[in-house]
């Protein structure tokens, strides 16, 4: 919905879609089924900022916008007020760490303390490495988002990620930043604590396919100049190598055994992308398949359930990474590849599915909601003015209906946890709520 924390949220959107359309007229068909746990890439908006392209409600809801357009002129019953929603979502009124979107605020900001400069769309895997390390250490920091694909501010030099330390000095290169965090913040959990971790980090270059391009949106997937992916056998050899490496220290599910380390931070962004993008390129190739790669499956599961900073903040989702893969760019030499059909690329019940440990992540962060659905609702509540203005500007909703429609969507997200009993029983209201969900999906 916006760009403050680039939060990746997971929501059962199939259920939400059913609620939205529960009382629509018979001619308004429900959307096609989505996976049991559709994943929502839901990013925080500061003030009146909005850039819709990276903010993805999971589920095929855009069809509802077309089917329900004819009823948008009707009157809709009132959803709970914003004040009531704020009372149910106290996190929505808590002050968040400052995030500056340099594409919308191009002037040089006055920075205070530790600052992370990371890529604006959430695509850069090297930014994700450092972001995960920051969150795993529970550091208090500001964020500046840099648009690597468009308008970079004139005052910013170099690549993302970069860090501005408290003394005003800056540093780049993701692995160097992660290593230095242990020295800078000795009272936080150690990440790069031994040469064994260094060896595990170095194994990344040895195991991943040679001759592939390290792009943000299609990392290590294509060779040469074309849209032909690496052969399936080579991907399988890579996954075999990762599975074997995870057995080097067999006292736990992480790369260094029972202890989460910098090695997990370094590998996570690329294994995450592989888990969602390889099935789009080769039918049935599922890195999260524990029957084929048991240690790798256990690692995906541990990252989701035992590393709250990853499962509830940093990790991406299948729909988003599929959409990104369809874009032409450096990774595929400017030619979008032909993908496996969506129904064949994302079977349910794979390792690492679910919502992550939101309760643990939110425990020390009052500005974070206690569940993924509540966090999605809180984003709507917190950023309602900007979302409403953009929805009207884009033609998704009319001015007189957008406010009530967004409140209905927030209500339905809360209803997933039994907090709200009422549904939108008016057809026009249901249609407007569906149109709001379709707008958020895009």
Image (tube, grey):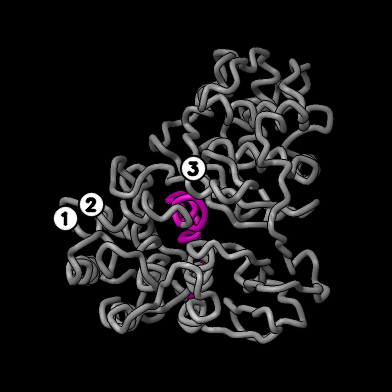
In the displayed structure, would residue 288 be above or below residue 39? below
Question: Dot 2 lies on which element?
Answer: loop
Point out residue 54 in the picture as x, y percentages from the top left corner. 60, 55
Q: Which mark, by number, is residue 359?
A: 3
Alpha carbon of mark 3 to alpha carbon of mark 2: how far?
A: 27 Å
Residue at which label 2 appears: 289
Task: Indicate which disc, 1 or 3, sits on the residue closer to the N terminus.
Answer: 1
Is residue 299 on the magenta stretch? Answer: no
Residue at image coords 47%, 47%: 360
Asked whether disc 2 touches disc 1, contact meaning CB atoms under 8 Å apart, the reply is yes
Is residue 322 on the magenta stretch? Answer: yes
Point out residue 242 in the picture as x, y percentages from the top left corner. 24, 69
Relative to 229, 101 lies left or right: right
In the displayed structure, would residue 89 be above or below residue 29? below
Residue at which label 1 appears: 292
Residue at image coords 51%, 27%: 416
Q: Which residues are magenta?
A: 310-330
């Amino acid at each position: 919905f916006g760009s403050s924390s680039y939060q990746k949220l997971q929501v059962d959107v199939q259920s939400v879609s059913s609620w939205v359309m529960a009382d629509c007229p018979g001619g308004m068909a429900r959307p096609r089924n989505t996976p049991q746990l559709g994943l929502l890439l839901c990013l925080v908006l500061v003030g009146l900022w909005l850039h819709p392209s990276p903010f993805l409600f999971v589920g095929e809801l855009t069809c509802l916008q077309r089917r329900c357009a004819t009823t948008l002129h009707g009157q809709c019953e009132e959803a709970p007020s914003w004040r009531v929603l704020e009372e149910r979502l106290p996190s929505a009124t808590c002050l968040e760490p400052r995030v500056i979107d340099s594409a919308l605020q191009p002037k040089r900001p006055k920075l205070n303390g530790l600052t992370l400069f990371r890529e604006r769309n959430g695509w850069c895997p090297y930014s994700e490495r450092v972001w995960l390390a920051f969150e795993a250490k529970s550091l208090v920091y500001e964020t500046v988002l840099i648009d690597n694909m468009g308008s970079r501010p004139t005052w910013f030099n170099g690549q993302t990620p970069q860090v501005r330390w408290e003394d005003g000095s800056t540093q780049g290169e993701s692995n160097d930043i992660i290593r230095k965090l242990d020295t800078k913040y000795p009272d936080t959990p150690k990440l790069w604590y031994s040469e064994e971790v260094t060896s595990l980090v170095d194994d990344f270059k040895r195991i991943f396919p040679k001759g592939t391009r390290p792009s943000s949106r299609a990392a290590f997937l294509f060779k040469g100049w074309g849209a032909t992916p690496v052969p399936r056998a080579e991907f399988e050899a890579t996954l075999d190598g990762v599975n074997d490496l995870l057995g080097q220290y067999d006292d736990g599910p992480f790369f260094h055994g029972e202890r989460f380390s910098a090695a997990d931070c370094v590998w996570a962004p690329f294994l995450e992308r592989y888990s969602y993008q390889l099935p789009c390129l080769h039918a049935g190739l599922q890195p999260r398949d524990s029957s084929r790669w048991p240690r790798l499956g256990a690692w995906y599961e541990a990252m989701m359930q035992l590393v709250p900073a990853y499962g509830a903040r940093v990790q991406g989702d299948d729909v988003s990474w599929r959409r990104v893969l369809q874009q032409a760019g450096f990774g595929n030499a400017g030619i979008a590849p032909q993908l496996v059909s969506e129904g064949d690329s994302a079977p349910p019940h794979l390792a690492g599915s679910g919502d992550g440990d939101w309760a643990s992540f939110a425990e020390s962060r009052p500005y974070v909601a206690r569940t993924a659905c509540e966090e999605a609702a809180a984003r709507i509540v917190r950023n309602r003015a900007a979302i409403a203005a953009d929805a009207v500007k884009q033609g998704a909703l009319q001015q007189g209906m957008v406010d009530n429609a967004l409140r209905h969507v927030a209500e339905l997200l809360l209803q997933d946890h039994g907090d709200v009993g009422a549904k939108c029983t008016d057809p026009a209201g249901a249609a407007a709520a569906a149109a709001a969900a379709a707008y958020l999906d895009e």
